[in-house]
């Protein structure tokens, strides 16, 4: 079993950011700058074509740390960020680019590729969680949440379906095709966001995935707008949702 190996550290505005590796998988861990007490851990999955420290990821992590005192971890998905692309990655990316250039639906390719990435990423996430829980400031007793949209949902749904340590999750913006079967195995509280006018994911597809979750407590947030127009306040909502279910009070007006 691999342990966490820290490679860099910075601190700003009360948030401590540490780069790490677990085996060959690079990640980032955000924590409160002060205080040594244990706190819940939130795992964050990034979107397709981005990486663990993309601006949206960093912003969400800072919200979760500053407002709830959580630890927040993200890792680069296979073929993303600091990880090399393989021949299969290049093939699928080229297929997506060709479909977009031709004005053809890109959804079937994205679903297929994301399902492939999830098969590789779920074991990596579980190994990363094992390693993070060895840290004294996290430990094995505290609750664990998950927050991921788009590809972060494609990986997070199968992860949550098999990982009993995750006790609440915020998802959104994905097709049900490869995920509905996993969603039916998930019973923890869920918050799900979709865009009512999404040009890639028909609203009925988003509703079908939400409906598939077996959770007794699940909340749907549907906003007007296109795929990339998810309101920023949805991040604030996800923070409040995770705070409620992981046992922390939000300390700001958000």
Image: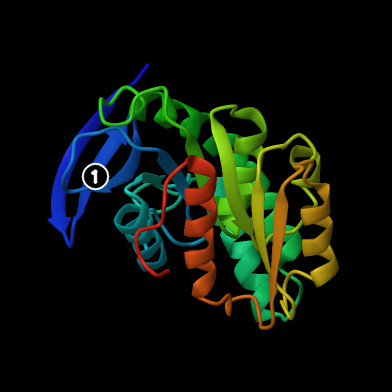
Outermost residue toward the top? 1
Viewer-nearest residue: 206 or 92:
206
Q: Position of residue 56 (x, y in %)?
A: 41, 66
Viewer-nearest residue: 219 or 253:
253
Instruction: Judge from the rendering whether residue 252 lies leftward or rightward of residue 166; answer left or right.
Output: left
SS type, badge 1 = strand
Residue at image location 14% in from the left, 52% down from the top: 10
Q: Is residue 1 above or below residue 45?
A: above
Viewer-nearest residue: 148 or 170:
170
Visible residue check, residue 47: no
Q: Is residue 252 above or below residue 79?
A: below
Q: In which quadrant is the N terminus drawn?
A: top left
Q: Position of residue 110 (x, y in %)?
A: 67, 59
Q: Position of residue 253 (x, y in %)?
A: 39, 70
Q: Position of residue 248 (x, y in %)?
A: 42, 46
Residue at image location 84% in from the left, 57% down from the top: 208
Viewer-nearest residue: 203 or 40:
40
Tag 1: Cα neighbours inside 10 Å, few (<14), some, or many (≥20)? Answer: many
The figure's colour scheme reads rainbow
Residue position marked by numbered label 1 in the rendering: 19
Instruction: Judge from the rendering whether residue 10 lies leftward or rightward of residue 234; answer left or right.
Output: left
Q: In which quadrant is the C terminus drawn?
A: bottom left
Residue at image location 79% in from the left, 41% down from the top: 214
- Residue 39, quarter of picture: top left
Q: Is residue 123 above or below residue 1?
A: below
């Amino acid at each position: 079993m691999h342990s966490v190996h820290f490679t860099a550290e910075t601190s700003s505005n009360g948030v401590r950011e540490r780069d790490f590796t677990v085996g060959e998988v690079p990640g980032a861990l955000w924590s409160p700058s002060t205080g040594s007490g244990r706190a819940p851990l939130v795992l964050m999955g990034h979107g397709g074509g981005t990486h663990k420290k993309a601006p949206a990821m960093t912003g969400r992590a800072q919200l979760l740390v500053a407002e709830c005192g959580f630890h927040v971890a993200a890792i680069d998905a296979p073929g993303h960020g600091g990880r090399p692309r393989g021949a299969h990655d290049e093939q699928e990316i080229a297929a997506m680019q060709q479909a977009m250039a031709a004005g053809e639906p890109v959804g079937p390719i994205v679903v297929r590729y994301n399902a492939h990435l999830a098969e590789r990423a779920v074991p990596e996430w579980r190994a990363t969680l094992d390693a993070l829980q060895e840290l004294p400031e996290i430990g094995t007793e505290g609750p664990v949440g998950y927050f991921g949209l788009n590809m972060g949902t494609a990986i997070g749904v199968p992860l949550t379906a098999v990982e009993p340590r995750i006790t609440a999750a915020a998802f959104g913006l994905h097709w049900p095709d490869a995920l509905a079967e996993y969603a039916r195995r998930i019973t923890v509280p869920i918050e799900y966001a979709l865009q009512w006018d999404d040009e890639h994911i028909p609203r009925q597809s988003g509703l079908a995935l939400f409906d598939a979750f077996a959770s007794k407590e699940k909340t749907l947030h549907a906003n007007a707008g296109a795929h990339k127009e998810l309101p920023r306040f949805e991040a604030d909502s996800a923070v409040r949702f995770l705070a409620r279910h992981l046992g922390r009070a939000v300390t700001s007006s958000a």
